[in-house]
Amino acid sequence: MILTLEAFWLGCPSSMSSSTQGSGGPSAKHTSVAFLKTHKTASSTVQNILFRFAERNNLTVALPITTCDHQFCYPRPFSAHFIHPHTTPPDIITNHLRFSRAELQRLMPNNTIYITILREPGAMFESLFTYFNQYCLKMERVFSLVMISEYFDESLVLLRRLLSWDLDDVLYVSLNMRTPDSKSSLSTENTAKIRAWNAIDSVLYDHFNASLWRQLRAMGLACVEREVQLLRQSRDRLVRSCFGGNLPPLRSAAQITNKELRPWQPSAKVEIVGYDLPVNMTQKGHVPPRDESPKERYGFPNKLLFFYSPFLAAKCP
């Protein structure tokens, strides 16, 4: 069965707040977002969603100055001086940075919503929860939403409602995936050691994983499941329309014809796969070469455009 948006809304709240505060009609899309990008947590996929939303709605995304490369001079403490002058004042900030709430408050609009995403680091050490609970509560006062990588689609349901976005605004294609040969299974013993070494991460993950599910239960798990189903159906239809009616095969970097779309490879032992755009899609969307000036449309260096979001410049039929 294919769900329609109209059928989905029946009996389900239209936003995160409406489930507890009642429906007050459709809200305007929220356009001021600070995403604290974390490592190896599906954060690049979230970043891609934010980039596409910004491009679709003519918003300004903060990007780093050239000397910072693709991160805001991470791991140096974040400073507004790290922002490329062509991308100020920003509506959205989403690249790696060392979090400084004071600097971000000076840079971003007052109504900015702060979000981030975590990934399960290993088994939880229950005895540490009380010790780190105060830190978790402090984070809750800053971040309106902490997404969880293992429940990515469910997190997107909450993100969409928090920002009053449309379903199309959170459709995505997974990025920076490793081949099965590049992954290794951890033993129970090693997993326990990793959790011990990353005790704070473990406590943070457990706390905000529980917080995520409290929000999902408040919305209604049946409604969440239906929206996740609708999200996945819509994503697959969109991707098929971009790739001639088929889901795109994952390709190694060497197999991708367009060199601009080849994913970065961290080492010879780890292979990151990506996608090759169909020839007709490249022609229709006109993926510009790196030396073509993007100032009128994007307002930031073209090299950054391709590094961050290879699908931005491509237009589906």
Image (cartoon, helix red, strand yellow):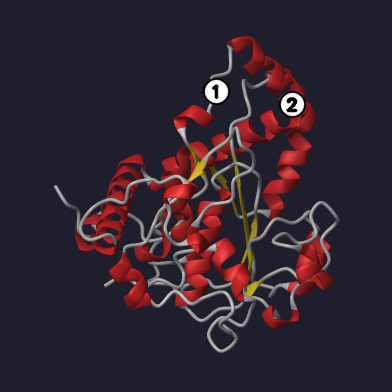
Residue holding disc 1:
184
x, y (%) of residue 14?
36, 61
Q: Nearer the viewer, residue 53 or 259?
A: 259
Rendered view: 26 above or below 12: below
Residue named by callout 2: 199
User: On screen, 90 above or below 16?
Assistant: below
**37 or 315, nearer to the observer:** 315
Q: Is residue 168 left or right of residue 54?
A: left
Q: Which of the 4 quarters of the picture holds residue 250?
A: top left
Query: Is residue 132 shown left or right of residue 1?
Result: right
Q: Position of residue 104 (x, y in %)?
A: 76, 66
Dot 1 surroundings within 10 Å: few (below 14), some, or many (20 or more)? few
Q: Are marks 1 and 2 in contact (CB under 8 Å)?
A: no
Residue at (55, 73) in percent of width and height: 31
Q: Position of residue 34 (x, y in %)?
A: 65, 63
What secondary structure is found at the residue carrying circle 1?
loop
- x 54%, y 46%: residue: 42
Q: Position of residue 143 (x, y in %)?
A: 65, 53
Q: Residue at x 65, y 44 (%)?
A: 39
Rounded to the nearest whole Å, what is the CA distance between mark 1 and mark 2?
22 Å
Name the quarter where the C terminus is drawn. Answer: bottom left
| N-term mark: 1 or 2 | 1
Q: Classify residue 149 as left or right of residue 83.
A: left
Give the residue type at disc 1: Ser
**Compared with residue 45, is residue 92 higher up or lower down, i.e. above or below?**
below
Identified by mark 2, the residue type is Ala
In the rendering, which numbered label is found on residue 282? none
Whether residue 218 is visible, yes or no, is no
Q: Secondary structure at mark 2?
A: helix
Q: Quadrant of residue 187?
A: top right
Which circle, 1 or 2, is nearer the viewer?
A: 1
